[in-house]
Amino acid sequence: MASGTESWILMATGRTPTNIAVIKYWGKRDEALILPVNDSISVTLDPDHLSATTTVAVCPTFDRDRMWLNGKEIPLSGDRFQSCLREIRKLADDVEDEKKGIRIRKDDWQKLHVHIASYNNFPTAAGLASSAAGLACFVFTLANLMNVKEDCGKLSSIARQGSGSACRSMYGGFVKWTMGKDACGSDSIAVQLASESYWNDLVIIIAVVSSKQKETSSTTGMRDSVETSPLLQHRAQTVVPGRILQMEEAIRSRDFASFARLTCADSNQFHAVCLDTSPPIFYMNDTSHRIISLVERWNRSEGTPQAAYTFDAGPNAVLIAPNRKSAGLLLQRLLFCFPPPADNELSSYVMGDKSILHEAGLQSMKDVEALPPPPESKDKSPSQKFPGEVSYFICTRLGRGPRVLTDESLALLSPTTGLPK
Amino acid sequence: MASGTESWILMATGRTPTNIAVIKYWGKRDEALILPVNDSISVTLDPDHLSATTTVAVCPTFDRDRMWLNGKEIPLSGDRFQSCLREIRKLADDVEDEKKGIRIRKDDWQKLHVHIASYNNFPTAAGLASSAAGLACFVFTLANLMNVKEDCGKLSSIARQGSGSACRSMYGGFVKWTMGKDACGSDSIAVQLASESYWNDLVIIIAVVSSKQKETSSTTGMRDSVETSPLLQHRAQTVVPGRILQMEEAIRSRDFASFARLTCADSNQFHAVCLDTSPPIFYMNDTSHRIISLVERWNRSEGTPQAAYTFDAGPNAVLIAPNRKSAGLLLQRLLFCFPPPADNELSSYVMGDKSILHEAGLQSMKDVEALPPPPESKDKSPSQKFPGEVSYFICTRLGRGPRVLTDESLALLSPTTGLPK
């Protein structure tokens, strides 16, 4: 198999962004291959703030495949990891590292075991599509280690089999997952609509909402919706195709009003289908509703959208503003309505790109307390404030696609033991 | 005009029940005539617990039409009252009261003014279809005073023009509002599917949910849905017609499992369409969601529906149990999860038919505090209790249609002044 001594370890480390759908994926036509009932479109988020980092190591003495997520070993036996691993192994090619004197032949990969360590730079429990970033990074980094020659489209179809929306994390900027027609799923892949630099003034603010409710997993929820919602197929077949075209056009022409209207309407329709499921699925809670009302009230008072909102399978809001100025005004409104609980530092309550905060004149908790009610709110009563309902905010932007990290100090596995550092 | 002295006052008093739709009305095809986009089916609630009582008085010296609601004068100028008043006046007939020596000719009604007093035996603000009962009672009692000979079907089409769902309050038991085809609305009327005695073991428990939110009126909400929801027409044209047939069959065969499944699914779909509206409409809140989860969990654990839930344009739950035993088990679950706030009397927290409470072994707050968690709840933590989220419960049943009250002591207007007593 490998040349010379058996003590070598070969590693690769990758970083992959999360993404948030603006035209939603909800419903599979094939459960095993993860083929969706409609196209979807997402924006990729800046990996500096929300990404998965994965190190994969191979060593001839590893006796089985192992994986660690955020420092804790997890079983790799699940169908989703296994199918990605199998597909990547099939595409693996010869690898030669002359410096280290390592040579792995194509066929060797079938017998070699890997160690995989992954971590998210944001709380996994926050429900921010960590599985999408994680699965995408798993596939991307394995493909890099195994010298897979296929393009990102092919890799996206493998990531899709791990977690549907993971395929959209294979590119930066604006990404479409085309549902495809092939029964084997070969054409159900992600394509980039525009890079993150094409429309680079968009600002994204995520409100991580506190929740006591246990949520339905999106896998289960989606299956229940397909089986029981009388509205789902109508959405998939009649409503979404038109919205996809309109959203592509909105992105192409950087038309924020249209982009925002479509984003909000499609988020609401996805949650409507969840509610139309039997038993009904509630991902949004009263806090989510209040955030929507805040944005809708502002948009209505201005006569044109100032911000868009979208919610995935949980209560967290992802808010999109057309530029830094609007983002500052949005952040003022959010902090007025959802101040941090007492004794909280502003700096730990608003994370990510804090410059938005400073440009909005918010340096400290005193500035937050001094915020006036938004002019569009008729009711100036203190009942408009809901401290504690939001756990924290993350300010971010659109981001790039997956990258290999060549700096070995960023690897999550030890180059000598192949175990987590 | 009238014979003899001008000092006489003629009065009539009627009582009309509220109703709750089990297949929902949401969307008008004609705003002015209030013609719906689909058929709907409702159950009429017992007027002993939830009804409107209206007294109408006519006197030759009244110089204008006036109305009092719950003791407070309100303007009668609205289109809705005016169109009902106009329609009833058109159908008015000769009235003769020999004892009082009063004679009113058909044509006199065009010039005579009326005083109307109405009150609801339940809080108007609770959002329990008070306008449906109120408008139906307005039409029913005016028709009685003015000796209108038309049947309830015709009266229902007049009440419909006051408030769509009011037409369904013209009958007891199970009522269908057929959308009709006629552009003038002549065939958009209510018909009784079965009387309240046909399926008389059903028990209804209403949870009046505390809410801080200001709600979208159903008139505005419905219009917004028709204009903006891509799912509404599909629901109206494709989903509801099948459900109407199934619900008629479930009622005919007293099939509670089918009745409950359809009721829950249709309530959820109505709220799904609200969410699919732009801007989205939220009538249910976290408490409503918790009530649904409680019922769904119980139903799932038993393998067949133990109770149904339905929500109108607000957060209140209307729960339907197949019999008194199930109702007692439901009430135990509800009181475990939503105990009254501290220092509350059980007797003022559970209103209406308290015998359900006693049969369930709940005589006092001590009995409520001693309730064990429902066996189907896996999580026995105290976070399952939400004191204060429900304002109160009303236990009731199906009820009869409108009645004339002949006992003059029940009249709301003075027989000598024609003003509220």
Image: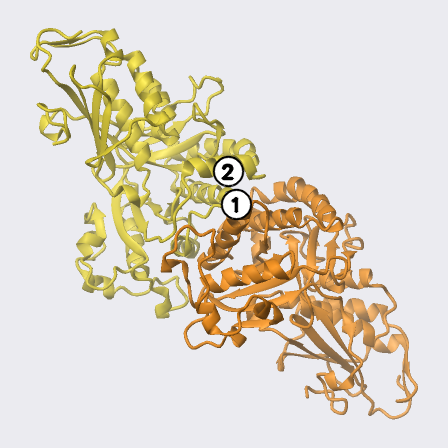
Chain colours: A orange, B yellow
> What residue lies at 28% left-to-right and 23% top-to-bottom?
B139
Q: Which is more toward the observer, A329 or B268?
A: A329
Determine which quarter of the picture holds residue B160: top left
Q: Which is more toward the observer, A316 or B2?
A: B2
On residue B279, the disc is 1
The residue furthest right is A98
Q: Amino acid at mark 2?
A: Asp
Q: Which chain does tag 1 point to?
A: B
Image spot of residue B264 (x, y percent): 43, 45
Determine which quarter of the picture holds residue A158: bottom right
Q: Amino acid at mark 1?
A: Pro
Q: Which chain does tag 2 point to?
A: B
Determine which quarter of the picture holds residue A409: bottom right
Residue B225 in the image: above or below residue A355:
above
> What residue lies at 24% left-to-right and 21% top-to-bottom?
B142
Instruction: Give the mark, 2 or 1, whose residue is nearer the N terminus.
Output: 2
On residue B224, the disc is 2
Q: Which is more toward the observer, B173 or B127?
A: B127
Q: Secondary structure at mark 2?
A: helix
Image spot of residue B295 (x, y percent): 39, 53
Image spot of residue B213 (x, y percent): 39, 51
- Quadrant of the drawing holding the N terminus of chain A: bottom right
Do pointers 2 and 1 mark residues of a single chain?
yes
Q: Secondary structure at mark 1?
A: loop
- Is residue B198 in view from this perspective? no
- Is residue A324 in view from this perspective? yes
Left or right: A115 in relation to B364: right
Q: CA distance from mark 2 to mark 1?
A: 8 Å
Residue B346 in the image: above or below residue A38:
below
- Quadrant of the drawing holding the C terminus of chain A: bottom right
Check if mark 2's residue and mark 1's residue have beta carbons within 8 Å.
Answer: yes
